[in-house]
Image (spheres, rainbow, N blue to C red):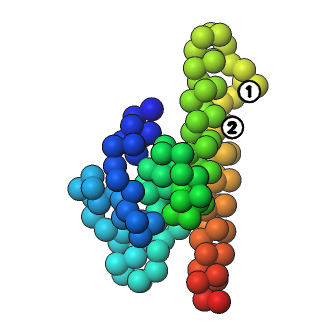
Amino acid sequence: MVVFGIAAWLTPDPRGFGTHRQLGMPPCTFLTLTGVNCPHCGLTTSFSWFVRGQFYKSIRANPAGLMLASASVVILIWSIFVSIRGAFVITHEPGRDILIGFGIWVLLSVVIWFLRLFWKQI
């Protein structure tokens, strides 16, 4: 909820990345050193567009951000349901499942990054 609140408070950077700078954070070191966006450049911007319902802009900023924001909504709803019910639903090992999901997300975000690099070359 806090992350979504911060995303709603921020103004999405029209470049598709750099929104995190409004929080006082430095520019992406990878981008600064290489001149190429890192796999996670645009995540904050993607979340900021997501909370505004601008899903096309969210995916343009970073497709991995849209996936992570969507998964966060599902996990939030699941957490509320589990809290009300007082027992786990769907899984009995949520820590393991979230870790596996996070690993899959990291892998997909790197694959998407490579594809985006390739498409910019064309």
Q: What label does residue 22 carry, if any?
A: none
Q: What is the three-letter code of the residue carrying label 1?
A: Thr
Q: Secondary structure at mark 2?
A: helix
Residue 34 falls in which quadrant of the image?
A: bottom left
Q: CA distance from mark 2 to mark 1?
A: 8 Å
For marks 2 and 1, the one nearer the N-term is 1
Q: Secondary structure at mark 1?
A: loop
Query: Is 91 placed left or right of 50 in the picture?
Result: right
**Residue 44 in picture, x, y percent from top left:** 43, 54
> Relative to 10, does residue 72 appear above or below in the rendering?
above
Q: Is residue 57 visible?
A: yes
Where the N terminus falls, by quadrant? top left
**Residue 77 in picture, x, y percent from top left:** 61, 26
Q: What is the three-letter code of the residue carrying label 2?
A: Asp
Q: Residues within 10 Å of mark 1 (few under 14, many from 20)?
A: few
Query: Is 47 placed left or right of 115 in the picture?
Result: left
* Residue at 35% over, 72% down: 29
Where the C terminus falls, by quadrant? bottom right
* Residue at 33% over, 43% down: 9
Q: Residues within 10 Å of mark 2 (few under 14, many from 20)?
A: few
Query: Is 92 placed left or right of 44 in the picture?
Result: right
Q: Is residue 65 visible?
A: no
* Residue at 48% over, 71% down: 38
**Residue 61 in picture, x, y percent from top left:** 51, 63
Marks 2,1: beta carbons within 8 A: yes
Disc 2: which residue: 97
Residue 4 falls in which quadrant of the image?
A: top left
* Residue at 39% over, 43% down: 8
Disc 1: which residue: 91
